[in-house]
Amino acid sequence: MSQERHFTTRRGFVAAMGFGGLGLYVTWAAYGASPLPFFSTHASDDADAHGGHMMRMAEDTDHADPSMSGMHEGGPLSPVEFTRRHAEFLTRFQEADGSVRPVAVPAAPVHEPDSAMAGHDQAAIKHGISTAEPIEVYFLAGRFSFEPDRLKLRVGQPYRFQMMASDVAHGASIAFGQASRIVRLRPDMVTTLDLTFLQAGTHLVYCTVYCGPGHDGMRGLITVV
Amino acid sequence: MRSIPLEAGLVLGVALVWAVLAAVYRFSPALGMPGYVRVWGAGAVMFLALAMPLLRWR
Amino acid sequence: MTEITFPAGAANQAEADRGPLSARIAALPRVDRRLLLGFVCVSLLALVLGLGFGLTTALARGGMIALDADSAYRVLTLHGTSAFFWWLYLAQVALMIGLAAGESTEGLKARPLIIAGVVVLVSGLVLSEGTALLRTPLLYDANPDLGREDPRAVAGMAGGHLLLALGLVLTSLAAIVTVLRARDRVTGAMTAMGFGVLAWAGFLIVSAIAAVNAFLPNLLWAFGRGAFPADAATEWHILFHNLHYLPLMATVLTWYALTQETTGTTSAFGSGFSKVVFSSYLVFVPPTSLYHMFLEPNLAESVRVTGSLLSLFVSVPTLTAFLVIVSSLELATRAKGTPAGLFGWIGRLPWGNPAFSAMGVAIVSTLLGLVFAFVLIQEKFAPLISDTLFVPGYFHFFAVGAVTETFLAGFLVIIPALTGRAVWQPRLMAAMPWLVLVGLVIFGACGMLAGLQGVPRRTFDIAYDGAAPAGWHALMVGFAVGAMVFASGLAIELFGVLRMLVGGKRGVPMAAMAPRPAGVPGGAAWTGPIAVVLLVALMTGATIGTFEVMRSLPIVVVGGHAGH
Ligand code: HEM
Ligand SMILES: [Cu+2]
């Protein structure tokens, strides 16, 4: 009977169509988000290099897991070291109104530029952004506030956000009006995010992981001038 | 040549996939998640057990 | 060499010969009918709770009612716990037991296990609901981090989930024994449904193991018997991944039974192929689990990327099952005389039958859900949408539109067979699933758009004292309106189902069709394949749209997760 079957009613055809969802791979690849190494991820740099931007970001995590931490030059920032630097950061840059305005300090401890950073620099040059060493920003999330909760940053200046949660898991999302950018923060695990704002503006920062009864009130502001 | 019932073949296939996954999670350092090894491993054993009555009919 | 025997036509005929499921269920021993009815009733209780708390949550999020933080998160905890854990799992037990019993002419085997299961499950339900009602709200994932100061809350939630797991093991074992004993005495062959129940029950047992892996450490800590469970978040993801595929597998198995029951159509592809499709859930689900963790800071980039690629496979079993059902229906309907056009046959389906109508809506809803599920598995989008309202916005297409509608459709077949009461207001009941779908579309569209704009999930006051972006509020109102619409449709369906249990008219159940094998050789079945092509086009559109949002966003992502 099978030789009389129309091809649309063959098992092989139906099974093959079942894999139709894999067709999405083409779109991913076209946007340079293809998950296989043989497609260059530089496509995504180019893809992102359009439109009006006010911020650029690179993300990295200092892993608590020693098997992964070797990949990051300079090694992970320990929670203890983070806490020390965070306190120092606040005392050094806090203004009279309570907001924090970090500025470059010549002797600040910085990471060695690695190959990925070289990539940043090329893209940065293309965007006309300062390729100066990023200014370190220490950002702590705890029940139920961010510290600092008011940051004053400069347009075009790269910042390296070192972020950690102090008690339970939190999230931090920066609102841009039409979309947001989110990170999850785990307790005692330092997450690093490089960002440069390309336009002036004021952005809400809010917690995206339910962390207890005060979760809804957990917010801050980033003012870019 | 001995034939095994389709049902047994399928369940054995499932057990095999789960066992392989458990092994991957066990030996791949980037996937430091022992919970996966426990769960997929236990599943592999369970499906293996489930295949036994299906095999034994003939 | 061993070879695997692949039965083609014979088993199909056997399935067609044994009569409709409703008749087989009506003929079960009295004790089995009682047990089945018990599971149906308890699961419906959970649905009533889930629906009520869900609507309250939605109204609070839309700003239509004001709840203080404690009550709001309590209601959300009660909603997730009642709807996700208890309704979806108790209904699965009811359907699994019903379908297993329908396999055997003698009814259920291993009844003591089932009776123990009833006791365990009811205690678990009481413990879960009681804890969620009275102790610190931990949300349905019962995160121990949030209960450090209230170990009893952690113990109660973990205890409830563990009792659910135990109840699932007991009832699944009974279902496995029942379908194994129901095999053909001579050849040992199983029907497609018998094998489907076996695979499903096996998967339920594994998930129970995952639940023990996730919640036993929490329980022990709460009793002062162990260290604080620092890995709770990861262990939860393992469990959760299983937990949200199981209802989908159950849904597809129920479609399979419902198609036979309401149209008489059996698979045109043979029962062997159906068995392959059913077992493919067990093959494709475990490797696709990583996408829940894309935002986790401790996940290596290489793992993220591989996880994204593997996740593309998650739809394979569901899409294949969809094609088997739709193409079989098309062939069978065309065989009765070809209506005009490519899609004319769809009009000849029994849309006036509430069970069929609910199943039809479920199929449409599944496809809609898949469109957006495929946005979520792209790891590059995780920083854009992962913890936002996008997630509940899309998954209610599955939770409500696909799974809940399907389970209710199953109940519309099983309950009349158990109680001898006719379906209440069949025309109204056949229309309600469509109302649910309309509500879901509003809820989903507003929820997903809000999520794309950054509205967080699980957050009730998103005004942030006026600092929130201007567009958020209107979308939240739309979200709540959509919820009101689908909650109304669901409430009416639920009322109709309850009327078949108490006080409804006695009468003949909806006519079950005499089963017959589908189709004529040589006929073509284009609708399913066209739907899949359309689905891929929509997925592509949604993905491109999301990439464009990312690009138009005033952000340049350079280098991504550098150094990995
Ligand atoms: C009956 C099947 C349903 C299931 C299985 C289900 C499942 C869930 C789950 C698992 C969550 C996530 C809870 C959390 O994040 O802690 C959720 C959230 C939610 N559900 Fe449902 N739900 C169902 C029905 C409904 C109904 C009928 C409504 C409203 C009419 C509803 C409205 C909501 C809302 C508004 C949220 C909260 C979104 C948020 O703030 O994150 N759900 N649901
Ligand atoms: Cu928080």
Image (cartoon, coloured by chain):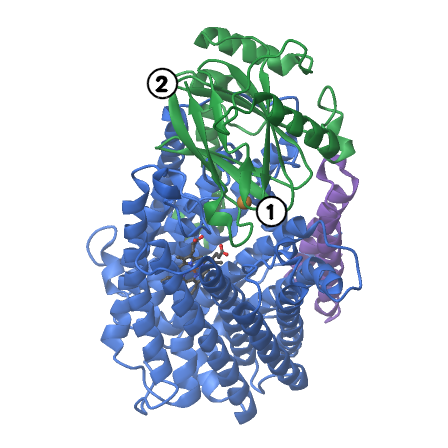
Tell me, yes or no, if residue C526 can be seen here.
Answer: no
Is residue B53 shown above or below C420?
above
Q: Which mark is residue C289?
A: 1
Hey, which residue is sitting farthest left in the picture? C340
Q: Colour of chain A?
A: green
Tag 2 subunit:
A
In terms of secondary structure, where does tag 1 sit? helix
Residue C125 placement (x, y as % from top left): 56, 75
Name the residue: 71% across, 23% down.
A72
Name the residue: 33% across, 56% down.
C440
Name the residue: 54% across, 41% down.
A145
Tell me, yes or no, if residue C111 can be seen here.
Answer: yes
Residue C547 placement (x, y as % from top left): 41, 29
Q: Is mark 2 within 8 Å of ligand 2?
A: no
Placement of the C terminus of chain C among the 4 image quadrants: top right
Question: Identity of the amino acid at label 1?
Answer: Ser
In terms of secondary structure, where does tag 2 sit? loop
Q: Which mark is residue C357?
A: none
Residue picked out by circle 2: A52
Tag 1 subunit:
C
Q: Nearer the viewer, residue C240 or A7?
A: C240
Question: Identity of the amino acid at label 2?
Answer: Gly
Q: Colour of chain C?
A: blue
Q: Nearer the viewer, residue A162 or C68?
A: C68
Hey, which residue is sitting farthest front in the picture? A96
Residue C387 placement (x, y as % from top left): 49, 44
Q: Is residue C230 left or right of residue C483?
A: right
- Around disc 1, counting alpha carbons within 10 Å, would you say few (fewer than 14), some (14 to 19), or many (20 or more)? many
Q: Colour of chain B?
A: purple
Name the residue: 51% across, 40% down.
C377
